[in-house]
Image (cartoon, rainbow, N blue to C red):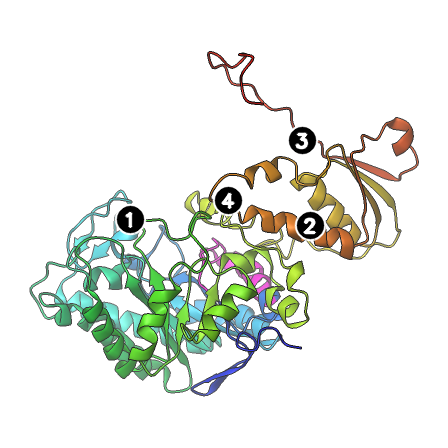
Amino acid sequence: MNDYPHLLSPLQVGSHELRNRVIMGSMHTGLEDRSKDLPKLAAYFAERAKGGVALSITGGYAPNWHGWLLPAGSLMASKRMADKHRLVTDAVHEYDGKIALQILHAGRYGYHPFQRGASAKKSPITPFKPKAMGTKEVEGTIKDFARAAGLARRAGYDGVEIMGSEGYLINQFIASRTNDRTDRYGGSASARMNFPVETVERVREAIGDNMLIIYRMSLLDLVDNSPNWEETVELAHRIEAAGASIINTGIGWHEARIPTIVTSVPRAAFSWVTGKLRPEVGIPVIASNRINTPEIAEQILASGEADLVSMARPLLADADFVNKTASGRADEIITCIACNQACLDHTFQNKHASCMLNPRAGRETELILLPVRTKKRIAVVGAGPAGLAAAVSAAERGHSVDLFEAGTEIGGQFRLAALIPGKEDFNGTLAYYKRQIEVRKINLHVGTKPDVSTLAGYDEVIIATGVLPRIPSIEGIDHQRRAV
């Protein structure tokens, strides 16, 4: 019996049938910035397509060098680069998935001195002040978007996503806070919309009717001097008329002070705004942000708030999210805890993104779980996060595993972290490991401190007992009434 009839149902969008309602949303991994990393990027997306994702969207590729996120960063501006991307698209198509290239002009959010913006207004989160684009340069940038889309078609992509949210260039044109122009791309709210609308029109002309155009639209900017709801609806109508196939939901500028994706943000906290837009347009809409379980995704779709759901970090955590859902194994999904430590934090440090719960994410060509030739008896001492991961990985490869824990429950300090208000999602990780202990037939011994004689008969012993807590030097810390 299918417990997720909406989530797992196909959807026809133009000439493309999406096999379910799960979109892997765009997330910059760092693998986009160097062509030598394209094999890794191909393996990364292929694993998600193999795991059942209907449509994946790449990290952002600039349409010209002024639009770089980073100096000499990801760019789609040449036939040579497009041809190299065949490696990525072919890998996804091998598993019957679809993939779209995101075209993103950073505008004043670029980390380089060659920035261009709607106006010469410096971002509070980047070090350089942008140069205001002249009218001819705006028109040239629209052509560059169209050229990048045409190159995406050459590369074998099924569509493109035009990044119009999160405070990047297109969003900067729409909002009066960053647009004080007096030409046809500034002034009234309708005039400020001309840039994105003309971009979608030119992209549609460049790629024809068979490719998807996803427009990622800011439905809530969460900053001052941004469009009101009536203006947002007007833009949606114009984007649809210009040729978009799908509208994706963007929430908040990067400089906004309101959290949108951290673990303390309630699950599906912003799906209501997608639901508010849905009856206003005749094309599918995608809900996004803090959707990390099939139950939440199904609820959003069943309630009519969206036609599709976007998940990025949850598919870093578990590439088999969809297949597990479809095969009745939803309780075996590694639930994203929105910690941001190995995904976004790594990206901001110019490192390749990965996942604290799934270190294979982004390293699919390096960390390969091959079945073992010789089965071993392995003892793992300590059932904190490290011990649990070691035990499950060893059992997954075919070893016989005994897991010893001195306490009465698994989890170690991770269990303590789950007690902090706002970090309740951490309990989902412990639930995953409890289930894996059952599924992988790991022998769990709680309340047990193995000694040398106990461990003597094993082929391998893994010590994962963690560290001793540090007692801070605080006056009164040794008081007899100190909480323990």
Q: Which mark is residue 466?
A: 3
Of 470 and 162, the residue lying toward us:
470
Which amino acid type is shown beneath numbered disc 2? Answer: Tyr
Q: Depth-wise, is mark 3 or mark 2 nearer the camera?
A: 2
* Element at label 4: loop
Would you name the residue on which mark 1 appears? 255
Q: Which mark is residue 483?
A: none
* Element at label 1: loop
Which amino acid type is shown beneath numbered disc 1? Answer: Glu
Which amino acid type is shown beneath numbered disc 3? Answer: Gly
In primary-sequence order, the first of circles 4 and 1 is 1
Q: Quadrant of the C terminus?
A: top right
* Element at label 3: loop
Answer yes or no: is residue 356 visible: no
Residue 34: percent from left, percent from top? 47, 56
Q: Is residue 324 magenta?
A: no
Q: CA distance from mark 2 to mark 1?
A: 36 Å
Q: CA distance from mark 3 to mark 1?
A: 37 Å
Would you name the residue on which mark 4 appears? 423
Residue 119 sits in which quadrant?
bottom left
> Given contact means CB atoms under 8 Å apart, are the residues at marks 4 and 3 in contact?
no
In primary-sequence order, the first of circles 2 and 4 is 4
Q: Which residues are magenta?
A: 24-46
- Residue under the point 19% across and 60% down: 175
In primary-sequence order, the first of circles 2 and 1 is 1
In primary-sequence order, the first of circles 3 and 1 is 1
Which amino acid type is shown beneath numbered disc 4? Answer: Lys
Circle 4: is it few (<14), some (14-19), or many (20+) Cα within 10 Å? some
